[in-house]
């Protein structure tokens, strides 16, 4: 049995969430670490 590569994404703004989704779709195990959660991650 082969283990999935593990990735940690720091931040969950637009870039962090996009990277997390792309990595999940590429079959990585993804953990996102963020101080703030959406919608407080992008300026208005």
Image (tube, helix red, strand yellow):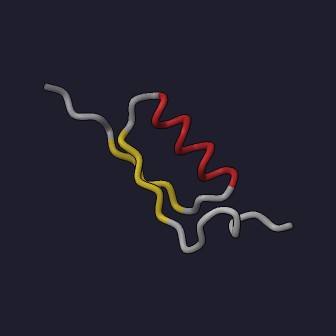
Q: Nearer the viewer, residue 3 or 44?
A: 44
Query: Horizontally, is 32 left or right of 5 in the view?
Result: right
Question: What x and y, as percent, mark residue 32?
Answer: 47, 57
Q: Where 14 sits versus 1, above or below?
A: below
Query: Horizontally, is 21 left or right of 1 in the view?
Result: right
Query: Horizontally, is 29 left or right of 23 in the view?
Result: left
Residue furthest to the right: 44
Residue at position x 49%, y 55% from top? 9
Residue at position x 76%, y 63% from top? 42
Question: What x and y, as percent, mark residue 41?
Answer: 69, 66
Residue furthest to the front: 39
Q: Quadrant of the N terminus?
A: top left
Residue at position x 60%, y 49% from top? 17
Residue at position x 66%, y 58% from top? 13
Q: Where 16 sits versus 10, above or below?
A: above
Q: Nearer the viewer, residue 21 or 7?
A: 21
> For residue 39, which quarter of the picture?
bottom right
Question: What x and y, as percent, mark residue 33?
Answer: 47, 64
Residue furthest to the left: 1
Q: Where 19 sits versus 26, above or below?
A: below
Q: Where 42 sits versus 36, above or below?
A: above
Query: Horizontally, is 8 left or right of 38 in the view?
Result: left
Q: Looking at the image, how many numbered discs can be counted on the residues?
A: 0
Q: Nearer the viewer, residue 36 or 10?
A: 36
Q: Quadrant of the C terminus?
A: bottom right
């Amino acid at each position: 049995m082969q283990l999935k590569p593990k990735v940690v994404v720091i931040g969950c703004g637009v870039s962090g969430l996009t990277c997390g989704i792309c990595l999940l779709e590429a079959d990585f195990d993804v953990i996102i670490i963020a101080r703030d959660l959406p919608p407080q991650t992008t300026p208005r």
